[in-house]
Image (cartoon, helix red, strand yellow):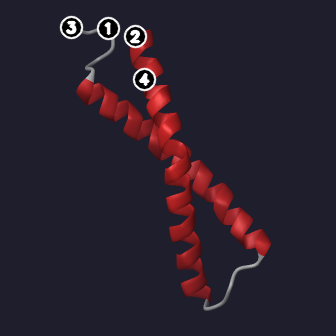
Amino acid sequence: MLNFIVWVVILAALLFWPMSKLIWVLSVRRLQRKLARELDEQEVAGQMNRARIISAFVSIVFSFLYNLSTIGMPGGE
C-alpha cells in the first residue's frame, strides 16, 4: 500500500509543473481572445492560481489511475 502511494505522489509531483504551465497558457490565451485585449498582471496571476488548482486535481487523479492500471490495486493480488 505504501509503495503505491509513494508512486502516486511521485508521478503527481512530476506532472504538476508542466501541466500547470500548459493549463495557464491555454487559459490566458483563451481569456485574451474572449476579452480582445491584453490581460493585466492581476488577471494573469489569477489565471495562474486557477491553473495550479486545476493542475493539482488533474495530476493526482491521473497519477492514481495510471498507477492503478500499471501496478494494480494496492493490497490486492
Residue identifier under label 1 = 75
Instruction: Classify 10 Å Cα crowding around label 3: few (below 14), some (14-19), many (20 and above).
Output: few
Instruction: Classify 10 Å Cα crowding around label 2: few (below 14), some (14-19), many (20 and above).
Output: few
- Tag 1–tag 2 contact (CB < 8 Å): yes
- Tag 3–tag 1 contact (CB < 8 Å): no
Q: What residue type is labelled 2?
A: Met
Q: Residue at x 71, y 64 (%)?
A: 46
- Is 21 above or below relative to 66? below
- Is 59 above or below relative to 68? below
Q: Give the Cα distance between marks 3 and 2.
A: 12 Å
Residue identifier under label 3 = 77
Label 3: element kind: loop
Q: Which of marks 4 and 1 is nearer the N terminus?
A: 4
User: Is 41 on the left-hand or right-hand side of 13?
Assistant: right
Q: Residue at x 49, y 38 (%)?
A: 14
Q: Position of residue 41 (x, y in %)?
A: 78, 72
- Tag 3–tag 4 contact (CB < 8 Å): no
Q: Give the Cα distance between marks 4 and 1.
A: 14 Å
The quadrant in which residue 44 appears is bottom right
Residue identifier under label 2 = 1
Q: Earlier in the sequence, mark 2 or mark 4?
A: 2
